[in-house]
Amino acid sequence: MAVLLFGIFCFPIFLTGCGSEIEKENLYEIYAVFNDETKTLACSQKVEYVNTSDNALNEICFFLYANSFREGQKVVSDAYFDRTYPSKQKSFGEIEIFSAKINDISADFEICEDGNILTVKLSKILYPNEKVEIYLEYNVKLANIRHRLGYGNNTINFGNFFPIICVYENGFVKNEFSMYGDPFYSEVSNFVVEINYPNKFLLASSGNILETKEDNENQERNISVCRAERVRDFCFVLSDRFEKRTEIVDDIEVNYYFYDDEFSNEHLKTAVKAVQTFGNLFGKYPYSQLSVVKADFCFGGMEYPNLVLIADDISKDDVDYVIAHEIAHQWWYGVVGNNQFENAWVDEGLTEFSTALFFENNAEYGIEYEKIMSGATENYKNFLRIYKEIYDDFDESIDRNINSFRTEPEYVNHTYTKGMLMFDSLRKMLGDRKFFKVLKEYYKDFSFENSSSEKLVQSFSEHSHINLEKFFEAWLKGKVVFG
């Protein structure tokens, strides 16, 4: 995410012929019907889950990110209140689970007190390498909120709307909700999503829109079938104001969905250049489409597989930066995953650094790499000076979960800014030839896998032939001194 601070089942298309490598990836099949009057999404979902662990399982856990918008949860800091709620009043949403089935037989389920984890009980033990089909019926109520899940005056955003299976690491990883950053962690999966919606809207989505047809039962509604392979999540956006521009680059369809943008051609060009630049620097973008979507959103932008949100209220001078940052996330978070709650710097620090590389490689924007780094250094020094006056026990470490940061500026300055400066320092230490080779090898090592703090350090050390543990420890544990 880019943060700008103030100051029934019906599945006509299935994935086939994907080979043995795909077989161990989960398959989500979702049928969703959007009611524009009630701002609700009625869903049926089937998940074919593969136990890739070494343990026998008697239950499956899902994260219910949609419940982070229910009453009692805080999704943004007070500083973002006016930008977040169009009505200037709080609005709430939630997900209601109606039923669960295991292989067509009703199953017991429970939702934890905080509302973030759904646990479905299995009727029999699921052993390693076995599969199970889990059916869920649920309803998502949207809040009137300019956020990843909700509706504003221009767009209806469906980010993290569905129950997604928690990553298993000797137990299911159950992150907390957080109003800072992106508290997400998921495995690469395959998706077939059928969306029924009023035909006044244009649809932007993750993956490829294979077919859009008129609903036989209601001529005022469309049904779109979308497929996304080997992605960590699925998102779609609806708007009755969207215009769309498209350009093909290296067999990749780059789309820009927008409204009220006289510079739409330029912003599409930025997206195209970002795909080319990052593909050259890190490795090929492995999907056939990418959509940049202007949207009602309270922060600068937000990344999803094959789709990024760009807030419609950011200044013209910031749009290109946000587009580049969010597209960099297609490599760092999208292809190379990580636990964004526990180790946010792994993707955000590297993504912010990658954004600086974009401008270094595209001089026509007039944003110099060295000025980005020097400005970031001064900003971080000023941040340290102010916060050390406020907090006697101020923690300068960055390798910690996002709820341990007391304020949003603290989270951003550590995860984004200090993370970026760390990678710049490593670049200078290794030299460009070795550094960029290491970066490409890291991308190759963890494509469609999950990385972590330890795995990143190990990969960088292995491919540079230098033990970098002390280097990273100094930065991650807060030992580096900013004079």
Image (spheres, rainbow, N blue to C red):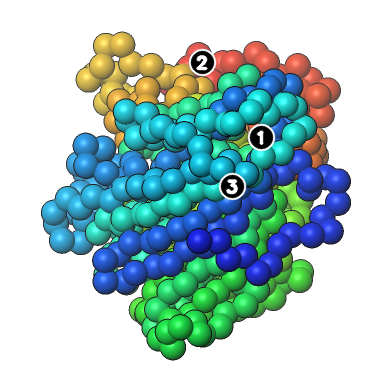
Residue picked out by circle 3: 104
Q: CA distance from mark 1 to mark 3?
A: 31 Å
Specify the label residue 450 is tagged with.
Answer: 1
The answer to whether residue 411 is seen in the rendering is: no
Where residue 51 appears, x then y in whole percent? 70, 32
Q: Farthest residue in the top direction?
A: 393
Up-down relation of residue 403 to residue 21 (above or below): above
Closer to the camera in the image, 31 or 67? 31
Residue occupying the point 26% across, 37% down: 73
Q: Position of residue 346 (x, y in %)?
A: 58, 33
Across and down, in percent, residue 259 comes to 39, 77
Mark 3 belongs to which amino acid? Asp
Above or below 15: residue 173: above
Q: Which residue is painted at 31% across and 57% down in the image?
A: 142
Q: Nearer the viewer, residue 467 or 142?
A: 142
Can you identify the residue that label 2 sits on? 477
Residue extending furthest bottom?
219
Is 222 left or right of 408, judged from the image as shown? right
In the picture shown, does residue 428 fall above or below 217? Answer: above
Helix, strand or loop for disc 3: loop
Q: Amino acid at mark 1?
A: Asn
Q: Amino acid at mark 2?
A: Lys
Q: CA distance from mark 1 to mark 2?
A: 22 Å
Residue at (43, 67) in percent of width and height = 33
Q: Earlier in the sequence, mark 3 or mark 2?
A: 3
Extreme residue in the front direction: 105
